[in-house]
Amino acid sequence: MQIGCHLPNQGPLATGESLVTFAREAEKRDIASLWVSDHVIFPRTTSGSYPGGRFPHPPDKPYLEPVTVLSAAAVVTTRARLGASVFILGHRHPIVMAKMLASIDALSNGRLICGVGVGWWKEELEMLGVPFDRRGRQADEILRAFKALWTMDNPSFAGEFFRFRELGFAPKPVQKPHPPIWVGGDSPGAFRRVAMFGDGWHATSKTPAEFREALDRLRRAAEMASRRFETIELSLRFGLRDDLIAQGPQAVIDLLAAYKRLGLTHILLEFRRDDLGRMLEILDFVTTTIRPAVDAA
């Protein structure tokens, strides 16, 4: 099971210096992947709920744009894969987004993981022009448009929301046929999207028991789509909280080993803090104490 971590991109660490320092230090320690999350604006009122609990980010706290962050990380690292947990598909026009993602794949020499989702925050999506009740259909269409732009010599596309004809689109992604698409979410629509369009499933905020139950539902969705379940890569975003760390290394090791036994192939450990020194301490804890034990489990 590969271990990745979230880049600092918010609050007092929303600076180039913090980003570059952490990315380079993580790569020195052979972290498998570096990740960002996607929000563009922060409405002060919300009618929805954040998956896994209350959304922890105050509206006025700085939050760097994720495509920009991954582009910066691409040119200061050489080995770690670069991913989003997740890009919200409706936030950007698909032609522009496909170009951005192909550019990151080029700048990184083929290290992009394209994590995608439909989004949950109604107010943010609607302010960005997304029809909230049709965001799933729009997301499917955007993924089809991505694949056309990334793989066709003269891409053309005609859908309900977007259309284009015989475009020149270069560079194509370095990875062929395109960067791996890891679909987030665990609704019936999300699992159908994984089976139809995804190379992997990117879960969030699940206990091992919840992850096991969700795998059963994903397996059924794959069967309905005539997709071999074994071809779907399994990943999870996991919050490495201070209260868990305080329980000692074995508590963390046991939990990650439980995910590994369920077939998880990649775990994103999120330990963003407002202090870079603390983040580097946790990074050392993960790479020197936790990772070797999980590898041996």
Image: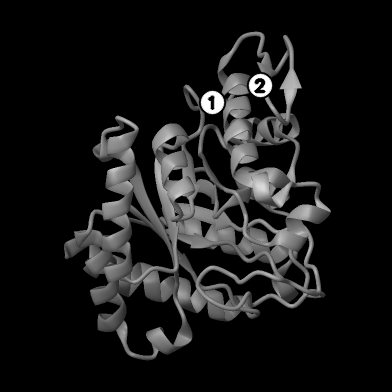
Amino acid of disc 1: Val
**Residue located 54% across and 62% down the image:** 6
The C terminus, quarter of image: bottom left
Position of residue 246 in the picture relative to residue 134 (left or right): left
Question: Which is nearer the eye, 148 or 71?
Answer: 148
Question: Which is nearer the eye, 154 or 213?
Answer: 213
Residue 45's image quarter?
bottom right
**Cα–Cα gap, marks 2 and 1:** 8 Å
Which residue is identified by label 1? Answer: 174
**Residue located 43% across and 33% down the image:** 196
Residue found at the far front of this picture: 133
Q: Secondary structure at mark 1?
A: loop
The N terminus, quarter of image: bottom left
Residue 171 disc label: 2
How many numbered callouts?
2
Instruction: Give how far across and how far down residue 188 sits, in percent.
Output: 43, 50
Circle 2/circle 1 CB separation < 8 Å:
yes
**Residue located 75% across and 47% down the image:** 130
**Residue located 75% across and 36% down the image:** 93
